[in-house]
Image: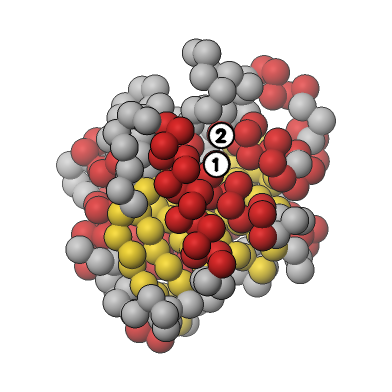
Amino acid sequence: MKFYCANSDFKKANIVLAGVPYDGTSSFRPGSRFGPEAAREASYAIESYSPYQNRDLRDIKICDIGDLPLSFGDKKLNFNIIESFADKIIHKRKKLISIGGEHLISYPIIKSFKKKYKNLCVVHIDAHSDLIDSYRGEKFSHATVMRRVAEIVGFKNLYQLGIRSLNKTDMLLPFRDTNMHLFNLNKAEEYAEKIRGLPVYVSLDLDVLDPSVLPGTGTPEPGGVTYKELLRCILSLKELNIVGGDVVELSPHYDSSGVSGIAAAVIVREFFLFE
């Protein structure tokens, strides 16, 4: 199944959508490997037209390339597959939007983008800082992914929004006072002004939404934002030079209503319409 209206031929497409169904380091509730397909299925429940942007998916050339063929447990192999795939998409001058999968999938994708864009900035929207250096002995984990990303792009080029779960040591990191915004998304416009004109990658963990809005995620965190607050944040970034992005941590089986998948699909639609 392809995402709604993502039927363009690869050569003609401006945007490529890829599912990255990996959740090998999920530490609480696994299942985000089913996220890409759930988001695609839910996309048929929403309109192609966005009243927020006055644009329609039917007017954009999007190729849904399907899910990457990943190993269930071989992390290193999966990194190689994901990075190699992203290299090819970037080389073809396409914008890559990925649906996870757990948040660790962002690491090999951003690593690939960094090869192309030396001054790459990353906007990270999440409930969790994901900045600890090692989680249960693992350097590469959904809980450490932004620490690894910061080592690639530089801490000064990582901008965090919505954080409400973090380690005490995160507060000692050099960028904490300028580029980490706790509890809400109010700094989005300020960040946008700082990075205007630079290449930007947006990584959005769906658990930034309150669990009452989106229960279908692996590590729900109370005290989150509403959908309207998240949408306002996303739209404040639309004029930036967004070269790629991901939407991660949809675990559909924890929401029998299916609303979480629909929320994810709408967010992906808005990402597409930035083109």
Q: Earlier in the sequence, mark 1 or mark 2?
A: 1
The answer to whether one can see residue 94 in this image is: yes
| Residue 188 visible within the image | no
Give the amino acid type for the residue marked by disc 2 in the picture. Answer: Val
Name of the residue lying farthest toward the top: 136
* Residue 207 point in image, percent of width and height: 44, 40
Q: Could you tell me if the residues under marks 1 and 2 are in contact, i.e. CB atoms within 8 Å?
A: yes
Q: Is residue 121 left or right of residue 106?
A: right
Residue 59 lies, with reference to residue 86, above or below; the image says: below
Out of 61 and 207, give the one closest to the viewer.
61
**Residue carrying label 1:** 107
Q: Which quadrant of the figure contains the N terminus?
A: bottom left
Q: Mark 2: which secondary structure?
A: helix
**Residue occupying image coordinates x 33% and y 67%:** 64
Residue extending furthest toward the bottom: 59
Residue at the spot of label 2: 145
In this rendering, is residue 254 above or below 40? above
Q: Quadrant of residue 152?
A: top right
Q: Which of these two is toward me, 273 or 232? A: 273
**Element type where label 1 sits in the image:** helix
Q: Amino acid under label 1?
A: Tyr
Task: Give how far across and how far down residue 218 sits, in percent.
Answer: 35, 32
Q: Which quarter of the figure has residue 46?
A: bottom left
- At 56% from the left and 23% from the top, the residue drawn is 139
* x and y, in percent, of residue 77 in the image: 41, 37
* Distance Cα–Cα, label 1 vs label 2: 6 Å
> x%, y% of residue 180?
70, 38
How dense is the environment of label 1, judged by Cα within 10 Å: few (below 14), some, or many (20 and up)?
A: many
Compared to residue 60, the image places residue 164 above or below, namely above
Name the residue rendered at 70%, 53% in the picture: 121
Relative side of 271 to 40, left or right: right
In front of the other: 16 or 193? 16
